[in-house]
Structure formats: structure tokens, C-alpha cells
Amino acid sequence: MKLYIFSILLSLLVISTTATLPKKQVVITYPSNTPDSVLDEAKLVITSAGGVITHEYELIKGFAVKASVKILDKVHALSSDFTPNIEEDSIVTASS
């Protein structure tokens, strides 16, 4: 528990120093067996550092955000068991 709190505080400290960096619009998704607590921790890290969650998905475990690259790197490193897939947000179309 102490390690968890320490890692959150350390994350917030590192991220607070990077809040003024340029932001990217990305989609972050997790494997379907990822606990909700992992997603909640990632969202907390992003919003605490000045990032914005622009959309939360219901059919998949994921959300769209606007955040700096350093924040995204931190989110990627949060969990070794449930590694997120972080990709740039883009418009997808289907043509026939």
C-alpha cells in the first residue's frame, strides 16, 4: 500500500513538472481483463498533470485523452501486467 501511494505521489510530482509541454490527442486502450483500478489510476495521473480525458469508451477498456508525451510515457509505465496501447487519435472511415 505504501509503495502504491509513493508511486502515485512520485508520478504526480514528475507529471506536474511537465504540464506545460505540447499535448497530443491519443486513444489509450487496455486488454479486456484489465481491472478498473488500473484505468482509474491512469486517468488520475493524466488529469492531475493537466491532461484532459475527452472520451471514455464503454465497449472496450479505454479512453481518449489530450496529454503531453511525458505523461503518456508515465501512463505506459504504470502497469507491467496490463500494458496500455497508446495510439494517435485519428478519423477512421469505411469505404465500399
Image: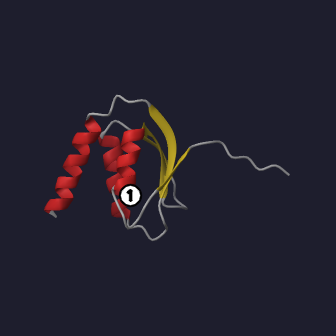
Q: Is residue 49 left or right of residue 82?
A: left
Where is residue 27 drawn, in percent x and y?
Answer: 52, 48
Work out whether residue 46 or residue 85 is closer to the camera in this orientation and state it. Answer: 85
Where is residue 62 drawn, in percent x and y?
Answer: 48, 56
From this view, report whether residue 21 is shown above or below residue 74: above
Q: Residue at x 35, y 44 (%)?
A: 46
Task: Give the quarter of the figure containing the N terminus.
Answer: bottom left
Q: Residue furthest bottom?
A: 33
**Label 1 crowd bin: few (<14), some (14–19), many (20+), radius 10 Å:** many
Q: How is the image coloured?
A: secondary structure
Amino acid bearing label 1: Leu
Q: Secondary structure at mark 1?
A: helix
Where is residue 73 drawn, in percent x and y?
Answer: 39, 47
Q: How many marks?
A: 1
Q: Residue at x 29, y 40 (%)?
A: 15
Toward which corner of the image does residue 12 lie, by quadrant? top left
Q: Residue furthest right?
A: 96
The residue at which mark 1 appears reads as 39
Q: Is residue 88 left or right of residue 93?
A: left
Work out whether residue 14 or residue 44 is closer to the camera in this orientation and state it. Answer: 14
Q: Residue at x 35, y 48 (%)?
A: 74
Where is residue 75 drawn, in percent x and y?
Answer: 37, 51
Q: Residue furthest left?
A: 2
